[in-house]
Structure formats: structure tokens, C-alpha cells
Amino acid sequence: FRKPGGRDAGDPSGIQSPSPPSPKPQSAFSTRWAANEAEPILKTLTEYFWFNTKNQREYINITRRVEDAVGKSGVREGMVLISAMHITAAVYVNDAESGLIADVEDWLQELAPEGPDYRHHRTGETNGDAHLKNLLMHHQVIVPITEGRLDLGPWQQIFYAEFDGRRKKRVVIKVMGE
């Protein structure tokens, strides 16, 4: 399947990707009002932030950034979606323990090792493993908001996982609720 507008720059098919969206606004806030306009029925906040990792693969705790967005939104009850906007990165929830993060890296390398001759590499790319790692870890999570705070378990943290780094990548946070 091909997404509308073709593939990334360098696509051998010659199809050009659409221009990336302007990074502004970095934040958008809106409120939908009930018919009587006395009570808001839905608040939303959208924020984007960028990564440019030093390493090919990195695991970055982004919990504080998500908490900040939830606080700014004013949402007391709802949910927040956190999504990596690239097909070689992931967002996941787990423990912020260094041994576990190393185990996740080893597990991903075992299931989708860097370097083998993936069919994707016939397009001129060399990141077939990063695409498969994205499929294993998923590109987004939804976290509940209760009483204005992330409703995470005692050890849960939110991570951005980069599998094809050293270039600019974006994450979107979408807060929704009352």
C-alpha cells in the first residue's frame, strides 16, 4: 500500500511526497460548547515536539512533556493520545528501568536485526529493521486522564523510541476531554 502523495524523498518511483506541514502552530487549543453555552463539552489541545537523536536508536522518557500538555489543556477527565509521526519510531508505556530498556533493545534486535538484506533495501533505503521495530512497538498510545493528571500505574512511564535516528522527527500530543 502507498500513502497518498507517494513515499519519502528519494523514492525510486519518482512520486514526490507532499511538503511537510509547517511546524507552526506548535500548540493549538480549542473548546467545544454545549448548546446552552454554559458548559464546555470537549476541550482539546494539540502540541508537537521534535527530536533529532544523536544515535541511530534511542529510548527517551517523554512522560514530563505529556504531563505538561495535560496541565496546559485544563482537561480534568479524558484521554491523551501520543503518536510518533514517523514510520521508524514508536511510542510505548513501560518501566523506566535501564535494564528493561536494554532488554527491549536486545529483543528488538533479535526479532528485527539491523543490517540483513530486507526487501525494503531494494528501494535504496537501509532501514528495513527500523520499520519492523515500529510494527512491534507501535507508533502511538492512549493514556487516561483522571482529575487532571495522567492515570498511569506506579512504574509506568511514556517513552519515545527512535529506530532510525540522527534526523529530525516529530511527535504529536492530542489531549481531549472535559
Image (tube, helix red, strand yellow):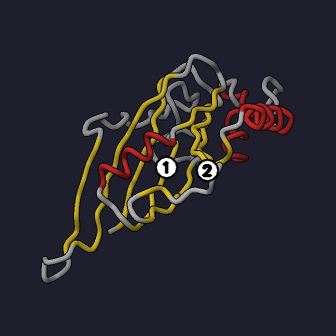
Above or below, comparing residue 134 to residue 70 in the picture? above
Instruction: For mark 1, give the secondary structure.
Output: strand
**Residue 128, percent across and down?**
72, 32
Disc marking residue 82: 1
Q: Could you say which is closer to the camera, residue 164 or residue 106?
A: 106
Residue most extreme to the front = 154
**Residue 135, percent across and down?**
69, 47
Q: How far apart are the two marked residues, 2 and 1, measured between alpha carbons?
A: 24 Å
| Residue type pointed to by label 1 | Ile
**Residue marked by disc 2:** 1
Q: Could you say which is closer to the camera, residue 165 or residue 1?
A: 165
Q: Earlier in the sequence, mark 2 or mark 1?
A: 2
Residue at 49% from the left image edge and 27% from the top image edge: 9
Residues packed near mark 1 inside 10 Å, few (<14), some (14 to 19) or many (20 plus)? many
Q: Pick the quarter of the image with the C terminus.
A: bottom left
Instruction: For mark 2, give the secondary structure.
Output: loop
Is 125 on the left-hand or right-hand side of 109? Answer: left
Residue at 52% from the left image edge and 60% from the top image edge: 151
Disc marking residue 106: none
